[in-house]
Amino acid sequence: MGGVGSGGNRMGNGIDTTPEDGLPECRPDAPQDVIDAFNYYRERVAPSNLRLADAALLEQLATLSVLADKLQQVINDDPLDHKASGVYLRVAAQMTRLSGLFGLSPGDRKRLSMKTDEEKDDLSEFFKGGDG
């Protein structure tokens, strides 16, 4: 499931210049828990920041989320399971990295400059010297 979607191109300058081509879809043959997690995350990312090419990265995030839930249950059942705890920490780190590509934390949203069209218009008017 490797590959890079347009999500990775948004970091840095905060502007995604790729044309909006629709929302990514999870593979229909993915496990149902992964599809559910995929849809959960897709609903929480601003649609203007998603492209069809983001499907692979969003599915990776969903898969990691499902794995994290399963590992959390193992740890809840046996808090001294250090192997599960170590894997959980690595999965959580990967989730944090991928989540950042989609602006799923306040700091990431700030870096991605997620402004609505109305906010962008207000700023454009301000810099043009308008009253708006």
Image (cartoon, rainbow, N blue to C red):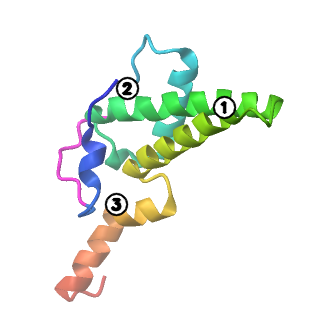
Three-letter amino acid code of the residue under disc 1? Ala
Locate the C terminus and report the quarter of the image it occupies: bottom left
- How far is mark 2 from mark 1, CA to CA? 30 Å
Three-letter amino acid code of the residue under disc 3? Leu
Q: Position of residue 28 (x, y in %)?
A: 42, 13
Examine the image and state in which quarter residue 13 appears: bottom left
Depth check: give the residue in front, 50 or 74: 74
Q: Which mark is residue 16?
A: none
Magenta-colored segment: predominant secondary structure: loop
Do residues under tags 1 and 3 come within 8 Å of each other at their CB atoms? no
Depth check: give the residue in front, 18 or 58: 58
Which residue shows up at 21% across the image and 84% down it?
127
Q: Residues within 10 Å of mark 1 (few under 14, many from 20)?
A: some
Query: Disc 1 marks which residue?
Result: 84
Which residue shows up at 58% across the image and 28% down it?
67
Query: Disc 2 marks which residue?
Result: 25
Viewer-nearest of discs 1 and 3 = 1
The residue positioned farthest toward the top in the image shown: 29
Three-letter amino acid code of the residue under disc 2? Glu
For the record, the magenta segment spans 15-23
- How far is mark 2 from mark 3, CA to CA? 22 Å
Q: Position of residue 54 (x, y in %)?
A: 31, 36
Q: Is residue 75 left or right of residue 6?
A: right
Query: Disc 3 marks which residue?
Result: 112
